[in-house]
Image (spheres, grey):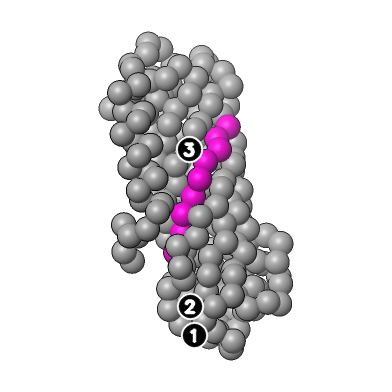
């Protein structure tokens, strides 16, 4: 899916150009390297009307989620992140055929803040912007196709657990709210929780 076209990617590039000169290595503690690769895997759990509503596109259930982030972490307690993710929502209650699902693909970018700098377990919070496009199967009231680019926000929390000198794991939870326009018109208000486990690799 060509996500490089649209305002989301331009915004992400501007963020990287602005903050890259600020990244500085720091000593001690997990995620002390200036560049960190984070690989996410878990579940996307719809909430509210996105889960059980009756409007066009509503009526989904939990599905698989995965993604990759790059973080610039040489900023003390702060880390700037940019990443890519995909979430799959089975949609039988929305009227999809058996086995069909929504495939939501997009980018995220924002700021993560570590509440504690030292120790084997370091809690964190994060807040950022997300973009998404959704591949839609045929619905009773809408054709199949790809939605327009939607822009929304996310917030989350978790902990960083050191496993080795340059490796850590990080269980976390994020809440995402983003609206997107369906192929046949109308707005799909996506609200979901991401529950995942992240493998953190320092460089």
* Residue 86 lies in quadrant: bottom left
Q: Are marks 3 and 2 in contact (CB under 8 Å)?
A: no
Looking at the image, tell me whether mark 1 or mark 3 is earlier in sequence order.
3
Residue 57 in percent (x, y) is at: 60, 75
Q: Quadrant of the C terminus?
A: top left
Give how far apart the Cα atoms at labels 1 and 3 are.
34 Å
- Up/down of 42 relative to 127, above or below: below
Of residue 10 and residue 203, the one placed in the foreground of this image is: 10
Taking the spot 51% from the left edge, 16% from the top edge, the residue there is 117
What range is drawn magenta here? 125-133
Would you call the spot at circle 3 few (<14 residues within 10 Å), some (14-19), or many (20 or more)? many
Looking at the image, tell me whether mark 2 or mark 1 is earlier in sequence order.
1
- The answer to if 74 sits in the magenta stretch is no
Q: Which residue is mark 2?
A: 183
Q: Which residue is mark 1?
A: 143
Q: Are marks 2 and 1 in contact (CB under 8 Å)?
A: yes
Residue 90 in percent (x, y) is at: 55, 72
Judging from the image, what secondary structure is the residue with disc 2 in? Answer: loop
Q: Quadrant of the N terminus?
A: bottom left
Judging from the image, what secondary structure is the residue with disc 3 in? Answer: strand
Q: Which residue is mark 3?
A: 110
**Residue 72 visible within the image:** yes
Residue 43 in percent (x, y) is at: 54, 55
Give how far apart the Cα atoms at labels 3 and 2 are.
29 Å
Q: Are marks 1 and 3 in contact (CB under 8 Å)?
A: no
Of residue 143 and residue 35, the one placed in the foreground of this image is: 143
């Amino acid at each position: 899916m060509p996500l490089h076209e649209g305002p989301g990617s331009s915004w992400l590039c501007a963020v990287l150009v602005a903050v890259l000169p600020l990244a500085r290595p720091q000593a001690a503690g997990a995620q002390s390297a200036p560049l960190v690769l984070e690989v996410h895997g878990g579940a996307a759990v719809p909430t509210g009307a996105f889960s059980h509503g009756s409007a066009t596109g509503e009526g989904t259930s939990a599905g698989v989620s995965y993604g990759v982030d790059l973080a610039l972490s040489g900023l003390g307690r702060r880390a700037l992140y940019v990443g890519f993710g995909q979430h799959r929502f089975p949609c039988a209650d929305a009227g999809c055929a058996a086995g069909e699902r929504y495939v939501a693909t997009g980018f995220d970018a924002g700021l993560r803040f570590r509440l504690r700098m030292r120790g084997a377990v370091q809690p964190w919070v994060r807040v950022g912007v997300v973009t998404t496009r959704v591949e839609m199967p045929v619905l009773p009231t809408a054709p199949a196709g790809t939605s327009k680019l939607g822009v929304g926000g996310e917030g989350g929390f978790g902990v960083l657990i050191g496993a080795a000198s340059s490796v850590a794991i990080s269980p976390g939870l994020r809440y995402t709210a983003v609206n997107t326009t369906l192929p046949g018109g109308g707005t799909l208000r996506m609200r979901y929780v991401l529950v995942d486990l992240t493998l953190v690799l320092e460089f």
